[in-house]
Image (spheres, rainbow, N blue to C red):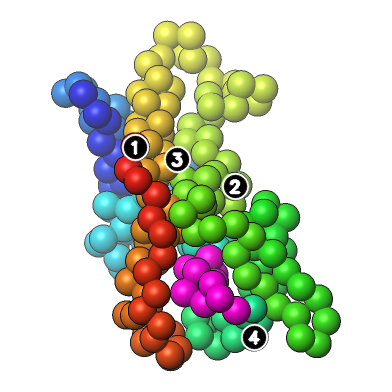
Amino acid sequence: MPAAIIIEPAVHQNLMYVINVSFGGALLAAVLPSRKVRDARKRYTMDPLYRWRMRLTDFTDYSLRVLMYAAVRSDELVTIAEISEALGIARGHLVKIVHALGRAGYLSTTRGRTGGLKLGRPASRITVGDVVRTMEADFRMVECFDTEGNACVITAACGLRGVLGTALRAYFEVLDKFTLADIAAEQGKLSRLLGLSSTEQPLVRMARK
């Protein structure tokens, strides 16, 4: 039975339960230390939808947006300044993001006055799962995911790592089914929202596995 991850803070003594995992009818929880309770509680109070989120970092979020922009304008070079204006993302952030995407081969950059950037490979060959794996810092959801730094005394008898590992694999199985071509398929609408001329040229989409 697939695992379901529900992020829902709830204060319990000196701990904050932040990840409830439903797996085969069992409900387990990962916890945050008490020093993080105040921030989690504040955010939970201000934003009720937070309880249902498993968030990516802004770095990964912005990386996907940059790739979508490049996919929409796949027939031409684009600049960081253009992307910054269209997406409303600070240029300083984009410089780091573009560098990381270029290093990973998702973008190809050309220097000089007439330079710019474009996709480093066809949109149909860039999966969302690969981008997320590359751009996220790590997916150590709990301490025991780090085999070298793990100091949890109950690891040998605890089933939580297996449950979260199964959930994480299921998460990526879904992301791996979708490519950049899939998420940027609405070329006309994206062009209009970005203030670009609509080309209505469909991207080649990868067949579902």
Q: Is residue 170 left or right of residue 27?
A: right
Q: Quick one: label 1 or label 4, which is nearer the N terminus? A: 4
Kindly indicate whether the residue at mark 2 contacts the one at mark 3 (C-beta within 8 angstroms): no
Q: Which dot, 3 or 1, sits closer to the camera?
A: 1
Label placed on residue 209: 1
What is the secondary structure assignment of the residue under circle 1? loop
Disc 4: which residue:
81
What x and y, as percent, mark residue 196?
Answer: 45, 89
Q: Quick one: label 4 or label 3, which is nearer the N terminus? A: 3
- How far is disc 4 from disc 3 in space, using C-alphas? 40 Å
Residue 190, compared with residue 104, is above or below; it is below
Q: Amino acid at mark 4?
A: Ala
Residue 118, compared with residue 208, is above or below; it is below
Q: Quick one: label 3 or label 2, which is nearer the N terminus? A: 3
Q: Amino acid at mark 1?
A: Lys
Between 179 and 199, the one nearer to me in the picture: 199
- The residue located at (42%, 42%) in the rendering is 176
- How far is disc 1 from disc 2 in space, using C-alphas? 21 Å
- How far is disc 1 from disc 4 in space, using C-alphas? 37 Å
Q: Quick one: label 2 or label 4, which is nearer the N terminus? A: 4
- The residue located at (27%, 52%) in the rendering is 52
Does residue 55 appear in the picture of this structure? no
Q: Amino acid at mark 2?
A: Thr
Between 71 and 10, the one nearer to me in the picture: 71
Between 107 and 26, the one nearer to me in the picture: 107
Q: Quick one: label 1 or label 2, which is nearer the N terminus? A: 2
